[in-house]
Amino acid sequence: MQTVRSILESRISDAIRRVTGLSAPAMVQPATEVRFGDYQANGVMAVARQLRKDPRRLAADVVANARLDDMCQQVEVAGPGFINMTISVGFLAERLLQIWSDPERLGIDPAQDRQTVVVDFSSPNVAKQMHVGHLRSTIIGDCICRMLEFAGHKVIRQNHIGDWGTQFGMLIAFLQNRVDQLETGDLSDLESFYRKAQEAFDTDSTFASQARSAVVRLQAGEPEAVALWRRIVEASRRHYQAVYDLLGVGLTEVDERGESFYNPMLPHIVQELKEKGIAAESEGAVCVFLDGFMGKDGKPIPFIIQKSDGGYLYATTDLAALRFRIDRLRAQRIIYVTDARQKLHFQMLFATARKAGWAGPEIVLEHVTFGSVLGEDGRPLKTRSGGNVKLMDLLTEAIDKAMAVVEQKNPGLDPAKKAEIARTVGIGAVKYADLSTNRTSDYQFSFQKMLSLEGNTAPYMQYAYARIRSIARRAQDRGIDVQAGLADLDRVILAMPDELRLARSLVRYGEALEGAMGDLMPNYLTSYLYELAQCFSSFYNTCPVLDADVDLRPSRLLLCELTARTIRHGLGLLGIGVVEQM
């Protein structure tokens, strides 16, 4: 089912073509103020300038030819040539019934051009706990995957973990006589081992020699070194998989391809770039110099793919990963979700891959950037001692604080139910606070704000959903079977202003999701859901539902049920759960 906006866009564009003979976009957008109509088309003015015609007169001709009578109760020309359109009550009512009949997709069509999309996100480091710096990549990437999967694309998640390098030589050398501690300890112990190994490497020449030897043995595939390396990786995986499970993101071991996976490919990457004349030696290193990448000193910026000592870098591994994703995973679109500080790296990565011919013009390469998580003091979020905030600690604290909210709101609930609600609300609060922020911006982390039952927060949205579900429970107590009553509903009555406002918001869900997916901006979706919840709140306060007249009650129950479905669906795409009561 097409969105209302896409139907209007098509009809206005057809009318422009009939009137002028030109193909031009109608540029239809939802109106910012309802008194000016539900939608506004402003593409006529561009055509008028091209034809040197009066835009208002041309807009009037377009309106006369637009065939909008079945959709709009009012169409008028405003300002210098805008076309304002108010959707008719009859069309809204019919649309609501169509959405109701499609509980899985809510009337939203899958994408016509379905692609294989690789999404690279999260990327923890082995032997280190995930910290708050991993939060945004993990949940933004997961949300993007969920939206694209709903659109019908084949989405391949890729967790590019840091599991290779000289640091593993130090760890292997340090842990050779401490394997039992590795098996019984947690990741904080492994981090402690790493710090001690680093200190020993810097101060003890004998240990440094052992560590270098361990690296050589690991790279050569020596069984004992490889076995210990695998134990280190597995110890790390136990930690970050627990974080993923708590966050409810769809990442598992199957999605992992670490630096170790690409390591055998790196010599071939360097060799091919050299043979193609794209890479060359510079001051002992092998570099790619690309047109348009200049430093402040006016000199070309090198994209280094091999160090002077023969070692490889992130750039080399990323090139190998990109090529693998195109050649082996058959990706038509690759999305990297990392912080904005890596912008230059990915620009040069993409430019190198295109220059080498690995990524043709038909392959879409995107770097989805995000800002930093700040403390309430406006500085990067840190512990009191100045260290990185561990992600598991932060999530556990969120659940604890959510439990306090649940205790205050509904102290009589069963303890197990309280724990379930606290987990859903606490994790949802953290995720929603992040996703409701424009991802390119920094945001301040505040438990007080994100757990508030007022404002654009997850608890507000979850409470709105729970309140709607309570209507169905009260209806059942009165002997009213809501689902049975709505199964045969063939007419929706929309008479009150708040009913109409809620109906208009409900039919715009597909447009909000289309915008969020088009720009990969989850906050478009959160803004829509918050607006929908506000519309429902106004409707609920002015329009009795269970106490409504018998002829009005089914229509109002439909509005309630559709609102609940939409909130649950939208929060689900954000990776956030709902609760039946709070």
Image: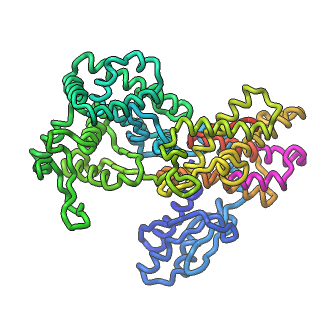
82 relative position to 557: left or right: left
- Confirm whether residue 148 shows in the render: no
Task: Considering the whole magenta stretch, tell me its main secondary structure.
Answer: helix
Seen in the picture, residue 166 relative to 68 is either above or below; the reply is: above
Residue in the foreground of this view, choosing between 288 and 26: 288
Q: Position of residue 191 (x, y in %)?
A: 42, 31
The residue at the point 59 percent across, 44 percent down is 430
Seen in the picture, residue 537 relative to 141 is either above or below; the reply is: below
Seen in the picture, residue 566 relative to 38 is either above or below; the reply is: above
The residue at the point 20 percent across, 49 percent down is 304
On whether residue 553 falls in the magenta region, the answer is yes
343 relative position to 444: left or right: left
Residue in the foreground of this view, choosing between 206 and 397: 206
237 relative position to 470: left or right: left
Q: Position of residue 58 (x, y in %)?
A: 52, 78
Seen in the picture, residue 318 relative to 368 is either above or below; the reply is: above
The residue at the point 24 percent across, 61 percent down is 293
The residue at the point 73 percent across, 46 percent down is 464
Q: Position of residue 560 (x, y in %)?
A: 76, 45
315 relative position to 482: left or right: left
- Confirm whether residue 543 shows in the render: yes
Residue 70 location, quadrant: bottom right
**Quadrant of image for the C terminus:** top right
On whether residue 239 falls in the magenta region, the answer is no
**What is the tally of numbered marks visible in this picture?**
0
Q: Position of residue 534 (x, y in %)?
A: 72, 55
Magenta-drawn segment: 532-558
Residue in the foreground of this view, choosing between 15 and 427: 427
